[in-house]
Image (cartoon, rainbow, N blue to C red):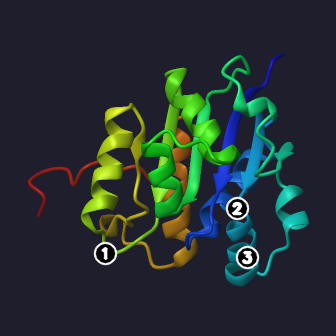
Amino acid sequence: MQKKRLIIAMTGATGAVYGVRMLQILQPQEEWETHLVISSAGVVNLAHEMDMKRADLYALADVTHGINDIAASISSGGFKTEGMIIAPCSMKTLSAVAHGFGDNLISRSADVVLKERRRLVVIPRETPLNLVHIRNMAGVTEMGGIIFPPMPAFYSKTDSLSAMVNETVGRVLDMFGVNVDGLYTPWQGLGGDGQ
């Protein structure tokens, strides 16, 4: 059986936990094959925010690629994937994707995903946003990408950071058809008159 391939990219923006959690959810799912690429700044942030080393992160992925390996399998449209998630995505990487500037394997892979009309989900981390950030998000959206800021849904009455992370991760992975049962509770409505 051919496994479904999903690219997980991590940059130096805050929020390394999102990429890590996605890999943790995907690792035991036999039908999925993860391809991980992390920037140099992402490695620094991983150590700072999660006390993890590159080797710890790599152990969660099926296949790993160097940030400068432009000849990697995921840099070609002929290599079939279900798409790509950039979690977290820095404004630098967002800009590169929005302008087709494939200067490293993350931006090149995102460009491939967009040109092949596959699903690209970008989890941007910056606040507040300036106009160029907003325009870059609009540009990626116009090319078919999905901008998914990691904003918690307070209606779920989540009371922990891990539950908030799981909700974002669950919703994003659900877009690709990944089994996320138990990761979060989808909104079912208030029922009745909402009282």
Q: Amino acid at mark 2?
A: Val
**Which residue is disc 3 drawn over?**
44
Q: Earlier in the sequence, mark 3 or mark 2?
A: 2
Mark nearest the camera among 2 and 1 is 1
**Which residue is disc 2 drawn over?**
20
Side of 22 relative to 96 (left or right)? right
Do the residues bearing badges 1 and 3 touch, measured as CB atoms within 8 Å? no
Side of 50 relative to 156 (left or right)? right
**Which residue is disc 1 drawn over?**
128
**Residue 69 visible (yes or no):** yes
Q: Residues within 10 Å of mark 3 (few under 14, many from 20)?
A: some
Q: Is residue 117 above or below residue 108?
A: above
Element under disc 1 = loop
Residue at the (30%, 69%) spot, across then down: 129
Residue at the (57%, 38%) spot, across then down: 110
Element under disc 3 = helix
Q: Is residue 41 above or below residue 159?
A: above
> Which quadrant of the view contains residue 24?
bottom right
Mark nearest the camera among 3 and 2 is 3
Element under disc 2 = helix
Q: Is residue 190 above or below residue 15?
A: above
Q: Amino acid at mark 3?
A: Val
